Amino acid sequence: MSKVCVFFGTGFEEIEALTVVDILRRQGIDTRMVSIMGDKTVMGSHKIPVVTDELLEDVDFGEADMLVLPGGLGGTQNLEACESLMKQVDAFVAEGKAVCAICAAPTILGHRGHLKGKKAICYPGMEDQLEGAVVTCEPAVRDGNIITGRGMGCSIAFGLALLEYLTDSKASAAMAEKIVFETKL
């Protein structure tokens, strides 16, 4: 069974983080909400407090299969400033394990040189920080072990891309139908 860690820093975008948690947990995937702030309660960018499952210092990264970095400008800045988390991001990329980021958070991967030659997307206007990436304009894009998403409005597509990576396209399509996800209104 896969284990996913979604990281929460003060100022995270609530919908981006919680949509991923919701979709993966609906599928029965062990998805842990992890605070990098030293307290299990983390305040989102829209002043919504979220109680996480555990603290960063308690995570056994050897058991994790995927790391997820939600956006929100403040949350992204807090994630990037967390050296112990960044060491894990670097290690996961080097090992070919899944690292996923949405909205402003893909810029972290760009700053660390992990997007060179890879297709990626981020929040509009921040593309210049995806250093070395082949920038696309999709809601979510996967290139190898890295999945990036465009922004809050693309959270479901991003979550489904993570689900597809962890399972298969059939499970992702079934989940999209179950949650009534329609790309055309």
Image: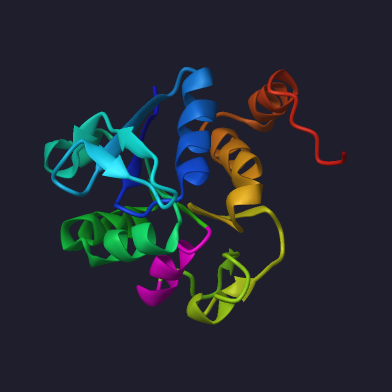
Give the camera-side residue of 106 and 3: 106
The correct choice, above or below, for 147 with respect to 22 in the image is: below
Residue drawn 69% across and 67% down? 136
x, y percent for residue 51: 28, 31
Residue drawn 71% across and 58% down? 138
Residue drawn 33% across and 38% down? 49
User: In the visual, does 73 lie left or right of 163?
Assistant: left
Residue drawn 45% across and 70% down? 107
Magenta region: which residues? Answer: 103-113
User: In the visual, does 100 lie left or right of 165?
Assistant: left
Q: Is residue 106 magenta?
A: yes
Q: What is the quadrant of the C terminus in the image? A: top right
x, y percent for residue 142: 59, 53
x, y percent for residue 83: 18, 63
Q: What is the quadrant of the N terminus in the image? A: top left
x, y percent for residue 23: 54, 28
Q: Is residue 131 visible?
A: no
Tell me where residue 184 sits by quadrant. Answer: top right
